[in-house]
Amino acid sequence: AQTVTQSQPEMSVQEAETVTLSCTYDTSENNYYLFWYKQPPSRQMILVIRQEAYKQQNATENRFSVNFQKAAKSFSLKISDSQLGDTAMYFCAFMKPPSSQGTYKYIFGTGTRLKVLA
Amino acid sequence: DSGVTQTPKHLITATGQRVTLRCSPRSGDLSVYWYQQSLDQGLQFLIQYYNGEERAKGNILERFSAQQFPDLHSELNLSSLELGDSALYFCASSPQTGGYNEQFFGPGTRLTVL
């Protein structure tokens, strides 16, 4: 069964600094998608960045980038030039389309609470 | 604002009761997803509908059921409620089904079971 592990329950970073949130997953599948979602205090879930497993190039969205290591099953999120508005819960998510014997899978990690300090 | 609406925002009820949570997806989105977020278990995928049909099932209890109507709104029914069902219930929608599609989340319904 697929699992997603976020081993850092809480992290903090100084404003303007860089922070990396870790995520590992376990799957025997070859075709899947990985996402980072952000949940600020408002509780609204917002997509930060996504990566297709068959793409070797790491995804980048402005100050957010990922380090995707398929063989190691690792998908870390790097936030550069951290801003106060980045304070939120960050969830790593694994999504798999159906195979011949399965169905869609949507699995979220338990989250990392990030606090950006002024 | 994601364009996904959920009602009610808050719901307080007693054990053994039944409640219905409602979700309206973004205009044009055919897929609806339901998630449960409790304090100690993170975000759990419950069920997905695509254009009226069930497409994927996650950790949804037998006491829970859902459906998607012809106008594409969806309802999640929770019955024989227990204290442990207290959680934030999210609905999300996407244009197509699964995979690479970004899911747009609603603001959630906070359910408190007393």
Image (spheres, coloured by chain):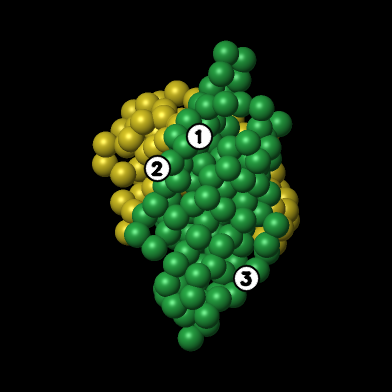
Chain colours: A green, B yellow
Mark nearer the viewer, 3 or 1:
1
Residue B32 falls in image quadrant: top left
Given the image, what chain letter belongs to the residue carrying mark 2? B
Pinpoint residue B65: horizontal percent, then vertical percent.
Answer: 58, 34
Q: For the residues marked 3 and 1, what is the alpha-carbon distance in whole angstroms?
A: 27 Å
Q: Amino acid at mark 1?
A: Ala
Mark 3 touches mark 2? (CB < 8 Å) = no
The N terminus of chain B sits in image quarter: bottom left
Determine the residue positioned at 56% across, 53% down: A76
Determine the residue positioned at 42% across, 47% down: A59
Marks 3 and 1 belong to one chain: yes
Q: Secondary structure at mark 1?
A: loop
According to the image, label 2 marks what residue? B102
Given the image, what chain letter belongs to the residue carrying mark 3? A
Location of residue A83 with respect to A110 vertically, above or below: below
Q: Which numbered disc covers residue A53? A: 1
Q: Amino acid at mark 3?
A: Met
Neighbour tally class for label 3: few under 14, some 14-19, many 20 plus, Cα within 10 Å: some
Q: Secondary structure at mark 2?
A: loop
Residue B65 as seen in the image, left or right of residue B6: right
According to the image, label 3 marks what residue? A11
Location of residue A17 with respect to B55 vertically, above or below: below
Q: For the residues marked 3 and 2, what is the alpha-carbon distance in whole angstroms?
A: 26 Å
Determine the residue positioned at 60% across, 20% down: A102
Mark 1 touches mark 2? (CB < 8 Å) = no
Neighbour tally class for label 1: few under 14, some 14-19, many 20 plus, Cα within 10 Å: some
Determine the residue positioned at 55% across, 76% down: A13
